[in-house]
Image (tube, helix red, strand yellow):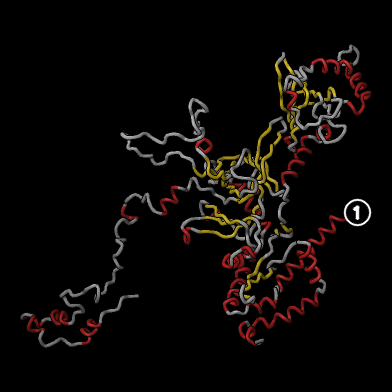
């Protein structure tokens, strides 16, 4: 039995001596290969396993095929399979790019200090125009595409607007008035009904601006910062011009 | 090889002029010419048939001598060569890739632009096979994606992957290319930088299956009235054609309820917004047919100009740099495959399995180098972290 393969492949008698020579040269190689296999690091050029096919009835080996590792080696680097949750990583990367300070993320995070539905918010647009204020009806959290819905009355007509919080066109978002009690719904669609409609928030915005002394004749910027300091954490977590 | 002369010719050559022949020839028998004619190779009487005859001409089953290139006729407009020529302009220069649709999101621009986009992920996309004009009739690259458990692969396919030296793939697909310049080395992995930002691609996939859908959903019919005496027919399609006089039949192709979706949809000319090798993604603008997790095919747009020459060269060079020994690997895998195939035929595969995998001296060296390099890199990565 042992002579048959030798007769068939006369050069295979060299294998034993080659193997011995290699072991003499670097003894730790086999340990290294073992470690490499467990950590899925670069696999050898032609390293493969066998996949046996067994006969169902007799439970004996019918045939076997070589199965190569699924990780390809590019030069000296192993190309591992790509991450599964790409969308999440992509969102994180995009948010980091669009909101480097993390102010917007913090403003709509699920924390105590963050803005919530029911708060009155004011959004300043980058392209100028009147800032839009309104009560926040819902926060749609979709990573980079996160948006808020604000409702106000302009000339006795209800107006609702969606704002993408990470969009560059949204220059600033400020909290005008917090809801005294936490809303018990995630989306306050009932506030569209006449019974619950808040109406115009113009007076709230006016009062808030006066409290920040925007209309004072002195130094508006300094006054604003003073007001901000006085308000502390309550005020403008996301207040950010440009 | 020249055709053999039939036996009777040899016989005639061997025979001397028979004494009867001079009687048939008239007084000029004394001249040398008639004597030569007596020893002619072939008789004048024609008795060759298909059965016994022979010819130095090729068989004339097909009249090849007509319609030659030199006959000044226009090139044929039908046939394989003409078909390839016709499709040349709309066949992409390069092979495409397979990807998985991961979902949709938006791409926020620096100037406030918001672009809806689809994220497509390339999961270990490898070239598996090249098809050539000579052998298969057209140029194409077979590409595989993902990973499949060997237990879920049939034995013939296991042998196929064994001969290629790559792991069994989840999906295989074929991308036609214009000519042999589009063929790729077998076993190389295509990464997202196969495409560049701003280029246009065609994305093909199977749309979501809706099952058996009614006329309103499937074809946008308007349905019927809610009232005015309507009875239990609010969403039915109504009449399917005129009655007697117009044939009293339903015209072929009439839009009716039926299976909806799960059809192959091609979205053409989608711009590539982003490519990322680390995440393995290609982000294209707009939407792509199919559910999340659907397999999509991405290839250079066939109705736009191919990517610039220097970009194509760059991707080629990158492939060569990343996989310098792809050819050697393929060759080694082929040899190993032949060895194993023989062993399987001779029922001594168990013996080889017990023997295990014995790398040659060169391979052992290569393995050692790779391991040493990765160890060095690990050390280099760890070193700054410690400080």
Residue B265 left/right relative to A50 = left
Along the line of sight, the residue nearer the viewer: A180 or B117: A180
Question: What is the chain identity of the residue bearing mark 1?
Answer: B
- Residue positioned 78% across, 20% down in the render: A198
Q: Residue at x 71, y 55 (%)?
A: A81
Estimate the x, y position of residue B231 in percent, counting from the top left. Answer: 49, 31
Residue reaching furthest to the top = A217
* Camera-side residue of A113 and B136: A113
The location of residue B151, given as percent across then percent down, is 64, 65
Q: Residues within 10 Å of mark 1 (few under 14, many from 20)?
A: few
> Where residue A125 sits in the image (x, y, percent)?
75, 23
**Residue B112 occupies quadrant:** top right
Q: In the rendered image, which residue does mark 1 sit on? A: B386
Q: Is residue A155 above or below residue B104?
A: above
Residue at image location 35% in from the left, 75% down from the top: B1
State the residue at coordinates (68%, 32%).
B114
Picture coordinates of residue B261 (x, y %)? 54, 44
Image vertical order of residue A239 relative to residue B101, above or below:
above
In the rendered structure, the answer to whether residue B251 lies left or right of residue A238 reads left
């Amino acid at each position: 039995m042992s002579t048959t393969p030798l007769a068939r492949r006369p050069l295979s008698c060299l294998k034993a001596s080659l193997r011995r020579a290699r072991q003499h040269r670097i003894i730790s190689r086999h340990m290294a290969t073992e470690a490499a296999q467990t950590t899925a690091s670069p696999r050898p050029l032609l390293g493969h396993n066998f996949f046996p096919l067994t006969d169902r009835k007799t439970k004996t080996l019918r045939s076997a095929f070589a199965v190569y590792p699924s990780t390809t080696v590019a030069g000296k680097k192993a190309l591992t399979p790509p991450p599964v949750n790409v969308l999440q990583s992509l969102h994180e990367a995009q948010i980091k790019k669009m909101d480097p300070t993390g102010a917007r993320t913090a403003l709509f995070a699920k924390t105590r200090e963050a803005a919530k539905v029911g708060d009155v918010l004011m959004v300043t647009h980058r392209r100028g125009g009147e800032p839009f204020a309104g009560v926040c009806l819902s926060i749609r959290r979709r990573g980079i595409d996160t948006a808020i819905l604000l409702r106000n009355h302009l000339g006795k007509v209800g107006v609702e607007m969606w704002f993408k919080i990470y969009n560059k066109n949204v220059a600033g978002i400020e909290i005008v008035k917090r809801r005294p009690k936490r809303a018990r719904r995630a989306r306050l669609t009932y506030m569209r009904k006449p019974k619950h409609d808040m109406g115009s928030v113009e007076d709230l915005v006016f009062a808030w601006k006066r409290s920040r002394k925007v209309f004072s004749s002195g130094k508006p910027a300094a006054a604003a910062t003073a007001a901000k300091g006085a308000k502390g954490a309550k005020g403008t977590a996301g207040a950010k011009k440009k | 090889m020249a055709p053999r002369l039939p036996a009777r010719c040899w016989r005639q050559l061997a025979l001397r002029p028979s004494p009867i022949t001079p009687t048939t020839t008239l007084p000029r028998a004394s001249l040398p010419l008639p004597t030569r004619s007596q020893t002619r190779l072939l008789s004048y009487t024609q008795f060759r048939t298909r059965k016994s005859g022979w010819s130095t001409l090729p068989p004339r089953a097909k009249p090849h001598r007509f319609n030659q290139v030199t006959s000044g006729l226009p090139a044929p407009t039908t046939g394989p060569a003409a078909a390839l020529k016709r499709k040349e302009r709309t066949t992409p220069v390069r092979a495409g890739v397979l990807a998985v649709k991961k979902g949709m999101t938006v791409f926020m621009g620096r100037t406030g632009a918001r672009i809806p986009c689809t994220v497509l992920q390339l999961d270990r996309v490898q070239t598996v096979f090249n098809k050539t004009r000579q052998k298969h009739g057209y140029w194409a690259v077979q590409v595989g994606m993902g990973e499949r458990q060997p237990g879920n692969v049939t034995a013939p396919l296991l042998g196929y992957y064994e001969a290629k030296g790559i792991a069994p793939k989840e999906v295989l697909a074929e991308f036609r290319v214009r000519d042999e310049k589009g063929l790729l080395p077998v076993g190389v992995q295509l990464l997202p930088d196969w495409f560049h930002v701003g280029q246009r691609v065609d994305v093909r996939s199977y749309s979501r299956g809706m099952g058996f859908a009614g006329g309103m959903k499937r074809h946008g019919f308007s349905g019927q009235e809610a009232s005015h005496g309507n009875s239990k027919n609010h969403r039915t399609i109504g009449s399917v054609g005129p009655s007697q006089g117009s044939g009293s039949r339903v015209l072929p192709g009439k839009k009716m309820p039926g299976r909806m979706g799960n059809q192959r949809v091609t979205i053409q000319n989608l711009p590539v917004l982003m490519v990322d090798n680390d995440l393995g993604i290609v982000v294209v603008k707009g939407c792509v047919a199919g559910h999340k997790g659907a397999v999509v095919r991405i290839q250079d747009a066939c109705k736009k100009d191919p990517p610039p020459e220097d970009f194509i060269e760059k991707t080629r060079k990158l492939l060569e740099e990343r996989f310098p020994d792809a050819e050697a690997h393929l060759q080694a895998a082929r040899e190993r495959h032949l060895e194993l195939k023989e062993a399987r035929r001779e029922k001594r595969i168990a013996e080889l399995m017990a023997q295990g995998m014995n790398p040659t001296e060169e391979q052992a060296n290569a393995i050692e180098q790779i391991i040493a390099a990765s160890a060095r890199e690990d050390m280099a990565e760890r070193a700054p972290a410690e400080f």
